Structures are given as structure tokens and as C-alpha cells.
């Protein structure tokens, strides 16, 4: 039994399937209550903002990257730049004059026209044309590298000359910002331009810009890196598997080069110096809103890069405290807060070590506090719905470790989940999922007892007796429950049946609750089982068709075909309800003779189907020999005992 599959913990967050895109935050009112124009200085260069923002971070000299060139005399207007030591690289051509360039012909200078040609190039060329284009793209990439190095050298020179007068080096920072952003063109031919980036050591230059004293220059580098490592650059590259493979390998090589220059450490240090907290709405002015938007955008691109790197080479001892602090920020959830929760889940997937690191930094308590704010407020929008689901997923991963379950109980997590059961569907489903997670196998015995003591039987009983869902529309608001919630309720009951000691007060209370009102709750479990069996039976012809298709595949094995069909049943959403209902009914039949007689009377001769369905479930468990109940028996042994007892009744 794969516990993570049982709780439907994701291999990746649902939102990560489609990569996020930055959306500018809505403007807030200024002191006079009018709408702030975020775009007031949208064409103003970052260097200009340096003068009015005065946000300068001292960079240690040993972090500065030495580059060749950068000569010139002391004249402020001297434009002599040092040469970049790269073989066979031509200097960047000077801009054409107005008559021969920008204001005539196509309205573009030669550099811009070449970029446009690359972006709109027809993909159907013969081999000779492809070779020529590859050579042209490689040459263009080298020119961009030379341009960036010159801009870096010139900016360093001007900053040294005029350290006390930012206005004297504004122009050099405008040029540097433009040179950085032009590197986005590399994404138009990943297979050719990315290897050139690595070959010419541009990772050193680009990563080094993350330490720039002007935060806006560092932010420009972040944005470009985010574009370069984005997954989309591979999917958009060419139309054949071979082209995609070349692009994928080139992207991997670039990410490795960036990692070798400690890009993640520098990104984490920038998280600390950036402040994406929205200003007070009462006192917000234009400048504060500009700072907020630019910092929020920079933080977003840092999170995007970390996601693209798939958490490789990331110091989570630094990242996790920042993510938890960001997740706990009060107020409405913004896109960076939702992104922080998503990244947290990505770090925890299939990584026990990272779960331990998060727990060490108070992850269980922090996630519970983040969820507690939904005791008195709804989920407002898609960002907040996604944010809450990521909180649930992150906690679900933490609860895979028994030690974190003890912390969950100490932080009164069971009591909080019972309170959240009173909320609407999405919050309620998340609470049920976590109660199911914390009560599973032997590590959940204490949680089962706490659940009974905290009045959980009454809450679960009330939810169990909700009207059975007839259509998807019935699952809204406080109406009937969806399949996920039903499977969780039945899973919690099952966990209590194999975890609570025989003759214990908690177990007696559980059995009394299930058998009260003339077996009304047992009848409801039977009805839920039937409501899941009907659609599965209707799907039988489709499952048979899929079975034949799988069996016809070259090299298909019988066990693989059965596994594929079983996966299709799970994907239908009904199998987990049927499976958990069967376990509850089997336990009750073995536990109480009167309950057994009632179940057999209600099902008639079809009650033996419970045995067949339990056998099918058991054959597909992954780690049934590892998980144990509170009494020490493995789940395999418990299931075997149940089915053998039922067979003895036939």
C-alpha cells in the first residue's frame, strides 16, 4: 500500500503542470485615494531608479568578477571599451544613423532586424539553410556576449570613477540593463545558442550580476535567467524528438554551468535583500508602489528559477525559513505567496531528508497556523485555492514521517482539522485528507485516540450521513460530498478499526457510533459502496477494451496489463470509495455478529463480492509488508486475516 498514493499526494503540485506567468499586482490607492499609476516611469531605466530609490547593497570585493578590458581615459564621455578575449568574434556594429537606419526602411536598425528575423524564421528549411542559420545564430550569440561584457566593464569603470555621484554612471547602467535583456534572444535557438553561452563562460558574467549593487540590474539578470531555464524553451524548440532532445541537453548543460557558479546561493541572498510586502494601502504613494511591484516581480523570478532547477543544488536550510515566513504573511494571498507554497511542496516530493529539514524549522506548526486563518474566512480566488491545496499537500508529505505526527498532535492539529470540517468544500476536503493521513498505519494510533477524545466521531458521523452525490454539481458548498471526501472518511474509519485496541473505550465508542440508530451508518456505508460500484460496472466494457489494447502492445506482460487497468479504475475516482467501504464492512463483519448478519441480509448472495474486490486491491499494494497497524501486524497480515475470515463464512 503506497501511502502517498492513498492520500493522493501529488508527484508535483497541480499548478506546476502549467508553468506560472508573472502578473503585475493590482495598483493600490495613494494617500489621496486615487489610483496609483504603476506605469508612471515604466520606460525609466533601472539606473535612473537607483538615484531615487537609494537601495544599494555593498558587495564584497572578493565576490566581484574580474573581466578583461574596460580601458579608457578619465574623460567621462570616453566610449573606448576593452576588447573581449574571444576568438573569431566581431565587434558589435555601431547603430546606423537616422537616415540609413531607424526612421527609414522597416523602422528597425540592423541589430533589431536580425533579432526579428530569428524570431520569425521559417522552420522548414533544407539542410544547407539550417546549417547557415545555425552559424548565423552562433555568431549573433557571440556578438551579444561581447556586448554584455563591454557593458559590464564600462559600468564597473564608471562606478569606480563616480562612486559618490550616481548620475554620472546612469548611462552605463542603462546600457547594461539593455545588454542583459537582449540575452533572451538565446531562447530562439536553444540547441545552438545555449552551448555557445556555456562555451564562452557567460554563466560567470550573468550570475555575477546577481550581486550588482543596483537591485534593478540584479533583477534584470534574474528575469533573463528565469527565461533561459524555463521548461518551455525545450517544448517550443523544433518539431521532432531529436530537436527536442538537443534542446533539452543544451538546457541541462546551461543549468549545470549556472549551478557550478552558485546561482542558487546568490538567488537566496537576493531573497533576503528584496522586500515584496505590499505597502500600507492608507499611506501608499507612487514610489512605494513602484518599489513593491519591482521587488515582487524579482522575487517571483527567483522562485521561478528555483522551480526550473527542480530544487537541485538548493540550500533548503536557508530557503525553508524564508518560504515559511512568506507563507505566513497575513492578508490576502498574492501570487508570490501561492508560489512559495508550491515550491515548498516541490522540495518535499520523494525526499525524506528535506521533510526532516522542514520539520526542524517548525514546518508542522507553521503550516497549521497558515491553515488556521481559514477558520473564519473563505478561499477568495484561484490563487488562494491553490495556496491552500499546497499547504495540505506539504503537510501530507510531512505526515508520512511518524515523528511529525507527534508534532501534529502537540500542535493540536487534530482539533484544528475538526474545526475546519465545518467550512465549505475545499477547506473541508483538505481537513479530511490530513485526518486520514495522520491516522494511517501504526503511527496513527495516537491520532485515532485523540480523534475520538476530541469529538471526531460525531463530526465524521454527520458527514458520513450527507446525501450521496448524484452528480458533480451536488458537491458544491455544504451539500453532498465528493469521492475524495468520502474515501477519506471511510479511510479514517478503517484506520481506527485496525488501530484502536480491542476492548478499549475508544473502540467501543467507535463501534457504538457505527451501529446506532438501527445500523443507519452501516446502511450508509453499503449505499456508498453501491454508488461506487455502479459507475465502475458501467465502465467495464471500456476497461475490457483497454485491456485488449494493452495486451496487444509489443512485449506486454499480463501483470503490466492488470496494473494498467487498475490504474484506470483509480483514475475514475470511484475505486478508492469502493475499496475503503469494503474494508470497513469486512472489519464490522468480523467484529460483531449482529453487524455481520445485517450486512449479509442487505447484500444477499452478492456479499462475497467484497472478498473478490479486497483480493484485487491487495494484489496491487506496493509496500503492504512495511506498513503496520498499532498491534504490530502488517497491513498484508491484517488484510489476509479479514479475507480468510470472510471466506470461512461462505
Image (cartoon, helix red, strand yellow):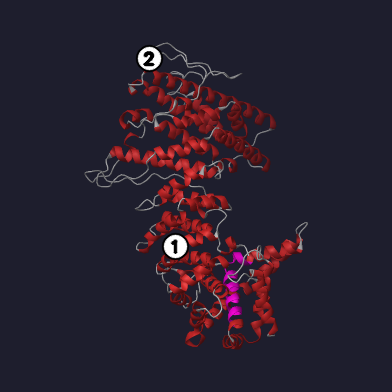
Q: Nearer the viewer, residue 83 or 520?
A: 520
Q: Nearer the viewer, residue 409 or 493?
A: 409
Mark pair 1, 2: CA separation: 66 Å
Magenta stretch secondary structure, dominant: helix
Instruction: Name the residue tied to disc 2.
Output: 76
Q: Secondary structure at mark 1?
A: helix
Residue drawn 56% across the image and 36% down it: 259
The stretch drawn in magenta includes residue 586 = yes
Name the one closer to the observer, 573 or 166: 166
- Nearer to me, 92 or 648: 648
Number of residues whose C-alpha sits closer than 10 Å to that of mark 2, classed few (under 14), some (14–19) or many (20 or more): few
| Image-based side of 561 in relation to 155, left or right | right
Position of 580 with respect to 481 (left or right) is right
Residue 359, magenta (yes or no): no
Task: Please tell me which of labels 1 and 2 falls first in the chain.
Answer: 2
Residue 384 versus residue 105 in the image, above or below: below
Residue placed at 55% from the left, 59% from the top? 401
Q: Quadrant of residue 129?
A: top right
On the image, the x and y values in percent for residue 472 come to 49, 69
> Badges 1 and 2: C-beta atoms under 8 Å apart?
no
User: Magenta residues, as a range?
Assistant: 569-588
Q: Which residue is mark 1?
A: 410
Amino acid at each position: 500500500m503506497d501511502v502517498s498514493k492513498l492520500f493522493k499526494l501529488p508527484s508535483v503540485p497541480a499548478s506546476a503542470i502549467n508553468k506560472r506567468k508573472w502578473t503585475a499586482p493590482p495598483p493600490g490607492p495613494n494617500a489621496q485615494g486615487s489610483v496609483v499609476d504603476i506605469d508612471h516611469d515604466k520606460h525609466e531605466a533601472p539606473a535612473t531608479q537607483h538615484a531615487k530609490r537609494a537601495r544599494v547593497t555593498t558587495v564584497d570585493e572578493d565576490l566581484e568578477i574580474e573581466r578583461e578590458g574596460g580601458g579608457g581615459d578619465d574623460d567621462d564621455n570616453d566610449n573606448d571599451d576593452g576588447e573581449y578575449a574571444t576568438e573569431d568574434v566581431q565587434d558589435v556594429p555601431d547603430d546606423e544613423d537616422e537616415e540609413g537606419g531607424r526612421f527609414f526602411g522597416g523602422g528597425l536598425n540592423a541589430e533589431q532586424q536580425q533579432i526579428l528575423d530569428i524570431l520569425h524564421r521559417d522552420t522548414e528549411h533544407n539542410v544547407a539553410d539550417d546549417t547557415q542559420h545555425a552559424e548565423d545564430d552562433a555568431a549573433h550569440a557571440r556578438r551579444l556576449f561581447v556586448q554584455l561584457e563591454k557593458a559590464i566593464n564600462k559600468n564597473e569603470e564608471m562606478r569606480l570613477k563616480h562612486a559618490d555621484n550616481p548620475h554620472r554612471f546612469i548611462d552605463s547602467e542603462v546600457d547594461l540593463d539593455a545588454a542583459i535583456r537582449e540575452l533572451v534572444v538565446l531562447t530562439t535557438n536553444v540547441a545552438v545558442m545555449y552551448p555557445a553561452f556555456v562555451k564562452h563562460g557567460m554563466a560567470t558574467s550573468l550570475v555575477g550580476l546577481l550581486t550588482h549593487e543596483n537591485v534593478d540590474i540584479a533583477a534584470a539578470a534574474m528575469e533573463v535567467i528565469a527565461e533561459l531555464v524555463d521548461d518551455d524553451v525545450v517544448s517550443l524548440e523544433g518539431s521532432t524528438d531529436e530537436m527536442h532532445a538537443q534542446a533539452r541537453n543544451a538546457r541541462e548543460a546551461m543549468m549545470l554551468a549556472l549551478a557550478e557558479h552558485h546561482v542558487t546561493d546568490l538567488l537566496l541572498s537576493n531573497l533576503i535583500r528584496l522586500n515584496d510586502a505590499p505597502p500600507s494601502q492608507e499611506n501608499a504613494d507612487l514610489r512605494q508602489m513602484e518599489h513593491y511591484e519591482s521587488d515582487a516581480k524579482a522575487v517571483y523570478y527567483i522562485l521561478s528559477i528555483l522551480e526550473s532547477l527542480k530544487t537541485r543544488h538548493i540550500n533548503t536550510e536557508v530557503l525553508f525559513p524564508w518560504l515559511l515566513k512568506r507563507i505566513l504573511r497575513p492578508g490576502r494571498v498574492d501570487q508570490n505567496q501561492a508560489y512559495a507554497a508550491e515550491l515548498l511542496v516541490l522540495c518535499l516530493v520523494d525526499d525524506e531528508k528535506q521533510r526532516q529539514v522542514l520539520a526542524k524549522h517548525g514546518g508542522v506548526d507553521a503550516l497549521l497556523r497558515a491553515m488556521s486563518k481559514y477558520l473564519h474566512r473563505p478561499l477568495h480566488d484561484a490563487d488562494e485555492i491553490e495556496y491552500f491545496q499546497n499547504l495540505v499537500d506539504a503537510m501530507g508529505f510531512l505526515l508520512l514521517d511518524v515523528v511529525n505526527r507527534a508534532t501534529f498532535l502537540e500542535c493540536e492539529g487534530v482539533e484544528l482539522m475538526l474545526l475546519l470540517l465545518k467550512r465549505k468544500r475545499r477547506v473541508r476536503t483538505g481537513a479530511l485528507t490530513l485526518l486520514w493521513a495522520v491516522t494511517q498505519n501504526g503511527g496513527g494510533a495516537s491520532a485515532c485516540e485523540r480523534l475520538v477524545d476530541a469529538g471526531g466521531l460525531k463530526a465524521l458521523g454527520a458527514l458520513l450521513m450527507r446525501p450521496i452525490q448524484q452528480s458533480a454539481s451536488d458537491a458544491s458548498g455544504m451539500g453532498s460530498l465528493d469521492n475524495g471526501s468520502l474515501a477519506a472518511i471511510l479511510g479514517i474509519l478503517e484506520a481506527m478499526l485496525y488501530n484502536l485496541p480491542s476492548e478499549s473505550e475508544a473502540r467501543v465508542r467507535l463501534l457504538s457510533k457505527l451501529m446506532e440508530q438501527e445500523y443507519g451508518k452501516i446502511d450508509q456505508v453499503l449505499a456508498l459502496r453501491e454508488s461506487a460500484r455502479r459507475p465502475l460496472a458501467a465502465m467495464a466494457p471500456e476497461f475490457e477494451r483497454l485491456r485488449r489494447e494493452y495486451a496487444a502492445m509489443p512485449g506486454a506482460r499480463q501483470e503490466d496489463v492488470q496494473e494498467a487497468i487498475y490504474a484506470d479504475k483509480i483514475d475514475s475516482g470511484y475505486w478508492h470509495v469502493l475499496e475503503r467501504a469494503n474494508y470497513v464492512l469486512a472489519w464490522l463483519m468480523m467484529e460483531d455478529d449482529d453487524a455481520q448478519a445485517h450486512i449479509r441480509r442487505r447484500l444477499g448472495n452478492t456479499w462475497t463480492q467484497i472478498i473478490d474486490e479486497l483480493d484485487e486491491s491487495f494484489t496491487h499494494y506496493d509496500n503492504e509488508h512495511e506498513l503496520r497497524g498499532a498491534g504490530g501486524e502488517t497491513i498484508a497480515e491484517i488484510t489476509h486475516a479479514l479475507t480468510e475470515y470472510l471466506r470461512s463464512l461462505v
